[in-house]
Amino acid sequence: MRVIVVGGGVVGTMHAWQAVQRGHEVVQIEREAEARGASLRNFGQIWVSGRAGGEELDTALRARELWERIGAKVPGLGFRAIGSLTPVRGARERAVAEAAVARPDAAARGYKLVTAAEAREINPALRGDFEAALWCERDAAVEPRTAQLHLREALRASGRYTFLPGREVREVTAPGAVRDDHGDVHRGDAVVLATGAWLSGLVRELAPDLPVRRVRLQMMQTAPLGERLTTSVADADSFRYYPAYASPALDALNAEQEQAPVAAAHKMQLLMVQRLDGGLTIGDTHEYEHPFAFDTLEDPYEHLTGVVEAFLGRPLPKIRHRWAGVYAQCTDTSRVVHRQQVGDGVWLVTGPGGRGMTCSPAIAETTANELGW
């Protein structure tokens, strides 16, 4: 079988991986020289802990298993089974963490409520002021800016993979065939459009009523911290945004403890992961209303800096990079992904939202199974 994958981000690359692993030939087409969207502009978190139960959690757990397997084959991914800690302060935040630990699926997520002293044993860099922490053992991390490069290197070694950058696919010319803006036609047995937040052009023509929206976020990265951050770190505002934490305790937190005004205005929570070079990736905000702003705002960065410094008990290293990114999210946010046949031999896979990096291996595996690869 010959598979044409359109899109060079992590979802597209994982579809290419699944096809090659199953013995098929793959041509992957990317409109930029390299992927430049949400697949790079993220935390690199394999984030099991906050996922909704049912299909979403099952997908995340399967993806976590696949990431570890792929990481063993492709060391350049930098897969690290680091877990996460969410420090809490006060009775209301602690009650949400306690409710999470009491969930029937808590063991699958690796939830445990630990004391501040136990949290510092797990992650000695957390020297700041907090009372306890929610420990999530199943969370992990990879290096988002280089993951696709290393995956493609491994795919090329198969002898059954071709990457074609700098080509925008413009037209479906026949079942399983597409034409790019160079005029070349690429023929296969199946075409997978994994174009991320690029929902215009051909995607709009093929699926004009797509139930997917775009979301913008801001993030930043620091110079090396100078010590290991042995886990990823979230704050209690993340309880407000991730469905796994829904409970009467969360309702009470939302009713009785307001977010900081900047955090509320920008729909924020802290997520933080250390990169292999020692720098910290920190975010994030959420913007849903179009048209998106073209500039980044400083208030959210100042808020995040204060939250991080309070947990670390030390000043944050110099900020080296700030950026904004856009990802595609199903308008029904309970859906893991939007997968739709949009032509003869052509399927569109988009809209995983903030789950894309976490769930992409399992999303691609499901596509491959459903299409009979």
Image (tube, grey):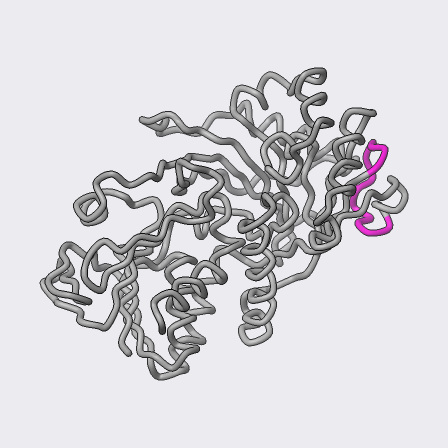
Q: Residue at x 78, y 41 (%)?
A: 102
Q: Nearer the viewer, residue 144 or 227?
A: 144
Determine the residue positioned at 30% across, 52% down: 340
Quarter occupied by residue 305: top right
Any part of residue 45 in sight: yes
88 left or right of 73?
right
Is residue 18 depicted above or below 131 in this figure?
Answer: below
The location of residue 316, given as percent across then percent down, is 68, 37
Q: Which residues are magenta?
A: 121-132
Residue 228 appears in the rendering: no
208 and 15: which is toward the camera = 208
Q: In the rendered structure, does residue 269 fall within the stretch colored magenta?
A: no
Residue 362 x, y percent position in the rendering: 49, 61
Q: Is residue 305 above or below residue 145?
A: above
Report the number of numbered marks.
0
Which image quarter holds the C terminus? bottom left
Q: Give the quarter of the image for residue 7.
A: bottom left
Is 131 magenta? The answer is yes
Quarter of the image that includes the N terminus: bottom left
For image coordinates 59% across by 51% down, the residue present is 57
Q: Residue 181: x and y, percent? A: 13, 57
Q: Position of residue 115 (x, y in %)?
A: 88, 41
Q: With respect to residue 351, does 360 lie above or below?
A: below
Residue at horizontal 41 percent and vertical 75 percent from the top: 155
Magenta segment, prevailing SS (helix, strand or loop):
loop
